[in-house]
């Protein structure tokens, strides 16, 4: 007996969302996992949500518009540091979380515009070099502006957001302690909520005039220009939006971490890791990007340390044998995964909807299923 | 009046002249064909019309005027704004933003809970610019008198009041040391074997030294402080001016280079298709057409992102219009397919639908019948005539003589970049020069 038809038609995302919402509320699963692995999966999921916002921003630039951006971490860092400067007690600004979120998003977008306006007229590879250079310049700037950014130490403590008083009773009802440092679930839901908003906005944009113009430029810039699309302006909008989202992710990152971390947290590796996420998941696809982040960051933050712990506990590795530490094989496994992907599934695990639609031709693509 | 006019248009690539002194004029509701052997420069004519190339000389006019982005106040405003932004950024770098931060924010803020006044911060920013001296608290209640950028410490004092006094006398000393004649209010003197700098109005000495050399070297030190501040101001001004000039000039240069881009020409009402099909391969057929309707849709990023009802309605209307165009070229049943997966003839027709979606007044078709079989190409004839009947002028490049001779109102013949004949199909067919170009010269013996 097969499943009823309505079940077939139902999209899968409400189910995933329900799991993500229920997981921390049920408390028990997280605690069991914590006892078993020594890692708070819920806490790590918060970071995965933040990186998902970052990857979605990068996906706007690389996936939709086809501009190879190798310096997204710089904008992530700009967001984190703007938040740090605006909120840490060492400086007199003491801005609230919402204002810091808006300002750091805006500042990163502005930085994107300043970088993009003169350089986006360049062709493909040159833009990649420019963004790569900007990423490094930003990192060194953050390090060398000792007075402002506290150099390699980073700015801290970044205070947690102020919880509106009316939210406290319902939170207690759900069993959540309204204290940011005691209960990871506040940040968990904050990051999840912002991620959902970003997904919704991008989903709308994907199917709008601007989204189509981005993709048209990716496909054929000259043809797009001949159809009346102002290529440099459209590319700049993608760049500003992508960098702005990166800044937003940076703000969240600094707030959850309660510190801006050092400038080296925003280095080239981070940019490449994010790029790997969206390539693995499928360029230009929202679902693919999310899956890519879940797999790669999840692997990086959860699987690798857990396996490390197991190896340690099982006593195979005696002390400092580097070959028997799983983390040291991490990059090897990343690389292998990407090579295999490129060979067998170059369009990514969950490619964008057009390619998807083409692979299952009989089912017509309507606005609802898109 | 002609719709589209080429006036002695020449295109050169280095030493190669691809198109030379071509004149032609397309009237409204006319099918005007350009034919000629391979390499005659036909596609170059299209590219120069649509702004992919600039003409080396000559003019292209559409409804009597050149299609260029106008020089408006917006260009000037953008140049000024970008110039200012660049200048300020450069100046900020020149004055050392890090030290400025220390002088304005950090010195005025004692820590959590302390007061912070933005007025004081701005005042200190001005002091920094002037090269003033600043006081900084040290450990153990001591105070240091430093240059505003914090680079040099000039003196220490046990209390704030003492530090204020020290600063005042140092300020006067720097004033004395400033190059030029010694001010009338201060003077140097020698008293009891001590070498003194004195202020006339003040009973106190500003400073005393053991020898004239010591005094001179102190004066030199203060003078160098003054000079450093002056140099920083000069550098900042230079950076500001230089940044402004570079920023404004860059904006104008970009405007100048972009004043005749394909998109300007497309927006004016000239659409085209490509000889080597250039569809948006990985987008659906419907989306290909929708992209070309970009100019017709309005609404900012934010409204698109939250999908307001206005935007929804606009989208629905655009989709309906796009479907109508697809129906017109006979692709309605393919709207959800990827453009890349269409058959060759269908791709050509999709290019036409896409070009029509920009609502042009003249459409440039570059070999639309290439690779079509006779049945398809006769269908195409009908389509081109229908396009003309929609009120458009059609400029056509084609090798299929059945298409060209069947539907053209007028034909121009290019050979080696020059126009060798123009006229009705009948005139062109019998023109000896055209026959010579296509079949070769008759051997005269």
Image: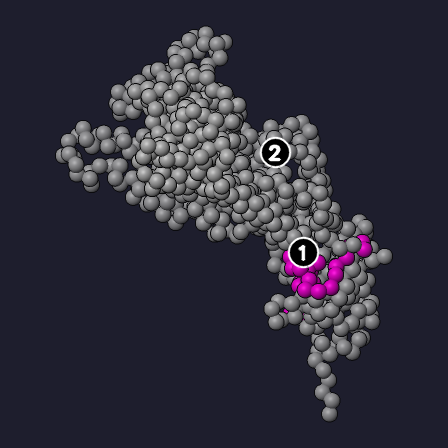
Task: Tell me the residue at 44%/35% (across/down).
Answer: B187
Q: Is residue B246 left or right of residue B372?
A: left
- Nearest to N terminus: mark 1 or mark 2: 1
Callout 1: SS: loop
Mark 2, residues whose alpha carbon is within 10 Å: few (<14), some, or many (≥20)?
A: some
Quarter of the image with the C terminus of chain A is top right
**In the visual, does A327 lie left or right of B54?**
left
Q: Within the magenta stretch, is there residue B56?
A: yes
Secondary structure at badge 2 equals helix
**Are marks 1 and 2 in one subunit?**
yes
Q: Position of residue B203 (x, y in %)?
A: 43, 24
Q: How is the image coloured?
A: one colour
Task: Identify the residue at image location x=67%, y=60%.
Answer: B54
Q: Residue at x 83, y 71 (%)?
A: B427
Percent position of residue B328, x then y: 73, 47
Depth check: give the residue in front, B21 or B147. Answer: B147
Q: Quadrant of residue B204?
A: top left
Residue assigned mark 2: B301
Q: Position of residue B136 (x, y in %)?
A: 38, 25
Q: Which residue is mark 1?
A: B51
Provide the residue span drawn in magenta.
Answer: B38-64
Image position of B276 (left or right of B125): right
Chain to which mark 2 belongs:
B
Nearer to me, A119 or A277 = A119
From where the camera sits, is residue B25 visible? yes
């Amino acid at each position: 007996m097969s499943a009823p038809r309505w079940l077939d038609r139902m999209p899968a995302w409400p189910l995933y969302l329900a799991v993500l919402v229920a997981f921390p509320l049920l408390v028990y699963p997280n605690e069991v996992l914590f006892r078993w692995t020594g890692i708070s999966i819920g806490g790590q999921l918060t970071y995965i949500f933040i990186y998902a916002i970052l990857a979605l921003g990068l996906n706007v630039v690389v996936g939709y518009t086809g501009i190879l951006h190798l310096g997204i971490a710089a904008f992530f860092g700009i967001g984190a540091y703007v938040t740090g400067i605006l909120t840490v007690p060492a400086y007199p600004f003491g801005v609230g979380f919402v204002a810091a979120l808006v300002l750091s998003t805006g500042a990163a977008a502005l930085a994107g515009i300043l970088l993009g306006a003169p350089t986006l007229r360049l062709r493909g590879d040159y833009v990649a070099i420019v963004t790569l250079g900007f990423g490094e310049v930003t990192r060194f700037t953050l390090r060398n502006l000792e007075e402002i950014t506290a150099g390699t130490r980073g700015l801290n403590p970044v205070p947690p957001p102020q919880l509106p008083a009316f939210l406290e009773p319902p939170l207690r009802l759900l069993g959540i302690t309204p204290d940011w440092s005691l209960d990871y679930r506040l940040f968990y839901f904050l990051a999840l909520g912002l991620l959902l908003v970003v997904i919704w906005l991008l989903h709308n944009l994907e199917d709008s005039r601007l989204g189509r113009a981005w993709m048209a430029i990716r496909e054929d810039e000259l043809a797009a220009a001949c159809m009346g699309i102002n290529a440099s302006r459209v590319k700049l909008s993608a760049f500003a939006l992508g960098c702005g989202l990166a800044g937003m992710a940076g703000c969240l990152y600094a707030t959850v971490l309660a510190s801006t971390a050092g400038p080296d947290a925003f280095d080239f590796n981070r940019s490449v890791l994010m790029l790997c996420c969206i390539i693995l998941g499928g360029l230009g696809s929202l679902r693919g990007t999310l899956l890519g982040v879940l797999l790669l960051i999840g692997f990086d933050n959860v699987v690798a340390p857990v396996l490390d712990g197991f190896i340690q506990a099982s006593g195979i590795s005696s002390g400092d044998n580097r070959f028997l530490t799983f983390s040291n094989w991490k990059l090897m496994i990343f690389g292998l995964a990407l090579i295999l992907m490129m060979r067998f599934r170059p369009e990514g695990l969950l490619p964008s909807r057009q390619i998807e639609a083409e692979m299952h031709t009989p089912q017509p693509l309507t606005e609802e299923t898109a | 009046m002609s719709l589209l006019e080429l006036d002695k248009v020449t295109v050169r690539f280095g030493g190669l002249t691809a198109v030379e002194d071509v004149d032609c004029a397309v009237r409204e509701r006319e099918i005007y064909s350009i034919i000629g052997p391979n390499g005659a420069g036909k596609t170059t004519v299209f590219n120069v019309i649509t702004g992919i190339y600039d003409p080396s000389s000559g003019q292209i006019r559409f409804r009597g005027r050149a299609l260029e982005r106008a020089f408006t106040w917006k260009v000037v405003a953008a140049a000024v704004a970008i110039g200012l932004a660049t200048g300020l950024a450069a100046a900020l770098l020149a004055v050392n933003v890090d030290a400025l931060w220390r002088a304005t924010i950090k010195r005025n803020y004692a820590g959590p809970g302390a007061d912070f006044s933005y007025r004081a911060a701005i005042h200190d920013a001005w002091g920094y610019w002037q090269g003033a001296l600043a006081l900084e608290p040290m450990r153990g209640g001591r105070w240091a008198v430093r240059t505003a950028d914090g680079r040099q410490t000039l003196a220490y004092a046990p209390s704030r009041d003492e530090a204020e006094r020290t600063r005042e006398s140092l300020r006067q000393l720097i004033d004395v040391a400033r190059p030029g004649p010694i001010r009338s209010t201060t003077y140097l003197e020698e008293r009891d074997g001590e070498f003194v700098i004195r202020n006339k109005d003040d009973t106190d000495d500003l400073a005393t030294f053991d020898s004239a050399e010591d005094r001179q070297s102190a004066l030199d030190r203060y003078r160098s402080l003054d000079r450093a501040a002056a140099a920083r101001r000069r550098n900042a001004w230079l950076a500001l001016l230089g940044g402004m000039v570079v920023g404004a000039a860059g904006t104008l240069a970009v405007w100048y280079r972009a004043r005749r881009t394909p998109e300007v020409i497309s927006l004016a009402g000239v659409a085209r298709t490509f000889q080597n099909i250039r569809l948006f391969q990985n987008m659906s057929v419907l989306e290909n057409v929708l992209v070309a309707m970009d100019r017709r849709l309005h609404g900012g990023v934010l409204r698109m992102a939250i999908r307001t009802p206005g935007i929804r309605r606009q989208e629905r209307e655009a989709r309906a219009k796009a479907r109508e165009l697809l129906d017109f070229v006979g692709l309605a049943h393919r709207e959800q397919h990827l453009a890349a997966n269409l058959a060759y003839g269908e791709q050509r027709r999709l290019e036409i639908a896409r070009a029509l979606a920009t609502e042009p007044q003249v459409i440039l078709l570059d070999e639309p019948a290439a690779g079509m079989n006779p049945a398809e190409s006769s269908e195409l004839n009908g389509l081109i005539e229908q396009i003309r009947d929609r009120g458009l002028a059609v400029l056509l490049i084609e090798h299929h003589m059945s298409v060209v001779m069947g539907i053209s109102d007028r034909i121009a013949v290019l050979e080696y970049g020059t126009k060798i004949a123009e006229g009705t199909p009948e005139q062109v067919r019998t023109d000896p020069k055209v026959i010579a170009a296509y079949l070769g010269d008759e051997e005269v013996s």
